[in-house]
Image (tube, rainbow, N blue to C red):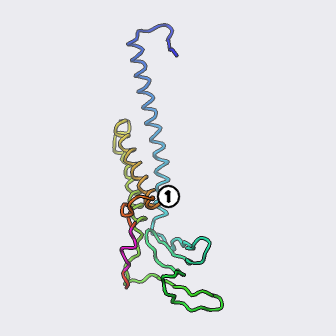
Amino acid sequence: MSTWVYPPIPADQQRKNEDKALQLELQWYLNFLQDQLGSLKEGLEDCVALLAPREPGSTLVLSSLRSENVKGHVTRVGTKIVKGDIHLRLVTLPPNTARTQANSNPSTRLTFGPCPSSPDLVLPQLFAVKSLINDSLDIIDVSRWTGEATDASFISGQLKLLHDHINNAKVYLKGAAPGQAPDSIPGGEWWQHSVDPN
């Protein structure tokens, strides 16, 4: 494929015009990106609102697939579990509830609620995700207001940093992949750190 201009212009003039057109296109992309960063910021602010410690919190139902081994619910406020009622029917746990007519299988019942003297039951994954989202919001603010919004190399670096933060938050929510060390995820080895018995 060939390109030509009528009336013909010198090759060096054509190169200058091409460079100028590329520069104008880059500036258009950078200006368009500023609008898109605003939309992304709104979405991340919605995520922060979901992780904010707001009463009454979210009640999450617990159940095991196709069995009654795990049943119950927990209430999450922000990044903490504040109360819950869980019934476990596991062979390795001795039951602490008696068999009744309504409940033919004995189970281990775990209940917990808010107590001023007890430590908070923080979910490290959610705490880390909230921190990463807040950092991402700061990156967007720097990219839009305090940095060089028209400098392509600066914006490129900010976008790479933003990508890393959002990708890490996604990995923390999904958990460790097969073959990945669980200690690379905050709270990944939760079974090694017991909750204070008080």
Question: Toward which corner of the image does residue 67 lie, by quadrant?
Answer: bottom right
**Residue 76 visible here:** yes
Q: Amino acid at mark 1?
A: Asp
Residue at point 38% right, 61% down?
A: 181
Viewer-nearest residue: 116 or 65: 65
Labels in figure, total: 1
Residue at point 36% right, 63% down?
A: 183
Residue at point 40% right, 11% down?
A: 11
Horizontal and vertical percent for residue 103?
62, 87
Viewer-nearest residue: 55 or 107: 107
Whether residue 40 is situated above or below residue 12 in the rendered picture: below
Q: Secondary structure at mark 1?
A: helix
Residue at point 46% right, 74% down?
A: 81
Horizontal and vertical percent for residue 197?
38, 84
**Mark 1 surroundings within 10 Å by alpha-carbon count, few (fewer than 14), some (14 through 19), many (20 or more):** few
Horizontal and vertical percent for residue 144?
39, 44
Query: Where are the magenta residues, as a range?
Result: 189-195
The C terminus: image quadrant: bottom left
Residue holding disc 1 = 46
Name the residue at the top extreme.
Answer: 7
**Residue 88 visible here:** no
Whether residue 197 is situated above or below residue 191 in the rendered picture: below
Q: Is residue 76 magenta?
A: no
Q: Is residue 193 magenta?
A: yes
Question: Toward which corner of the image does residue 196 lie, by quadrant?
Answer: bottom left
Name the residue at the right extreme.
Answer: 101
Horizontal and vertical percent for residue 120?
39, 76
Viewer-nearest residue: 67 or 165: 67
